[in-house]
Image (cartoon, helix red, strand yellow):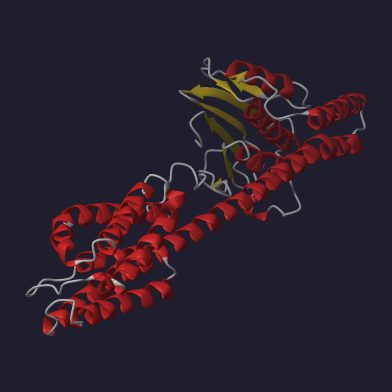
Amino acid sequence: MATAAEPAPALAEPAPFGIDPARGVRPSITQASVERAFAILIAVAAIGFGAINVPNVLQQLPSLDPFWGPLAAGLLGASFLFVGVSAFAQRLAQIAQIVCALLFLVVLVTWPLTVVHPLEGAEKPWPWWFCTVGSTAAAMGFAPWRAIVYTALVPAVYAWVAFSPLGGSGGPQALLDGAFTMILSGAVLVIAVLLRRAAAAVDVAQATAVRRYSSAIREHATEVERVQVDAIVHDSVLTTLLSAARAETPEAKALAARMARNAIDHLGAAAADLPGEAPPVSVVELRDRIVDALGTLSAPVTVRDAPVGGLRMPAAAADAIASAALQAAVNSVQHAGGPAVRRWVCIEQRGASVHVEVGDDGAGFDLAAVPAARLGVRRSIIERVQAVDGTALVLSNPGAGTRIRLAWSSGGRS
């Protein structure tokens, strides 16, 4: 190969898509995780507020009807327990939240009916202590517009109860208590709605990504199959036909006949090939396969000595490397020049990777000027090696010879 100028590299294009986005990537927020967090939050709030305010409820029981007062308190406490249990059974969470919210509203509205003796001083009706629990349960269990109505209704009902003759002292404090309840409940509602919308957007984005990735997989599989078919047609059919058309001497005719038999065998093997059936191939076997194939060419190709180890590679990768190397040598024989051109091949193992170089010091060519209809370099070499996660580097300039470097690594692209 000429040494006057370093050939210009032509890098193979990267693979059409990357790593599966669904693997190893866990969304930080999803609708299911948000609902789970809501169920735990309301469960903790219901059980915690219920336990803390039991003394306040017991203190007011003497002022309530001996039957309806304890019944209302007991039913509301049972709904709190139901909400707590629902944290461990997600399918019951929304039902428990709705039951708790509705039951609290009923208890609040019917409070004056359960009071026998007016409350003393500035004492608040015991449902006051659970307004936030009821509003939070509504924000998490109801649709947004129903939760908005509930959040506005509870403070209004409480203010009405507090201003009633049996509801305590009333006055400005009742209005402040109602406003406080509305602000706190509204904040909980806004947070719940925003988190749910954000989680829904994440779910939609993830579903879209998975759908697009599935489409990319199908397109990639189609592209790989197309590359394989194009390479087989070019290597086994077109090359054989061209050789037969140019065969004039008995040796050339015998070579064309041998190539035709090999083409028939290749097409039959490709038609019967099933993924995953062929065992791995060692680098030594790959080297022998390439050397045997080069022996059928009409021009000599020198095999340079290089270290090979015990690395084993998938049969598909070995087939792609061997076929691409043979096609590079065939291109050199056909286009690089006559007997004066020196041609060589070097097969080498470097750690966990395999490197094959096919070169000559012949005519060379401009890769960018190769017509798109010519499949030899693009389909039979570059894309064929890309399809098995390898790399192909074409180094050539007119008059400067050609070197084609193929590489495959067990750890991915080399």
Vertical comparison of 61 with 340: above or below: below
Return the residue nearer the eye: 197 or 188.
Answer: 188
Residue 370 on image: x %, y %: 69, 52
Q: Is residue 133 left or right of residue 336?
A: left
| Residue farthest along the bottom direction in this orientation | 171
- In this figure, what is the number of numbered marks? 0
Residue 300 on image: x %, y %: 71, 24
Q: Which residue corresponds to the image point at 63% horizontal and 54% vertical from the top-left?
A: 368
Return the residue nearer the eye: 126 or 210.
Answer: 126
Vertical comparison of 115 with 216: above or below: below
Residue 54 on image: x %, y %: 18, 55
Return the residue nearer the eye: 96 or 193.
Answer: 96
Return the residue nearer the eye: 157 or 327.
Answer: 157
Q: Is residue 133 left or right of residue 39?
A: left
Residue 90 on image: x %, y %: 43, 49
| Residue farthest along the left direction in this orientation | 121
The part of the image, by quadrant, that contains residue 276 is top right
Q: Is residue 346 left or right of residue 40?
A: right
Q: Which residue corresponds to the image point at 36% horizontal and 64% vertical from the top-left?
A: 103
Q: Is residue 195 visible?
A: no
Q: Which residue corresponds to the image point at 66% horizontal and 17% vertical from the top-left?
A: 288
Q: Which residue corresponds to the image point at 65% horizontal and 43% vertical from the top-left?
A: 383
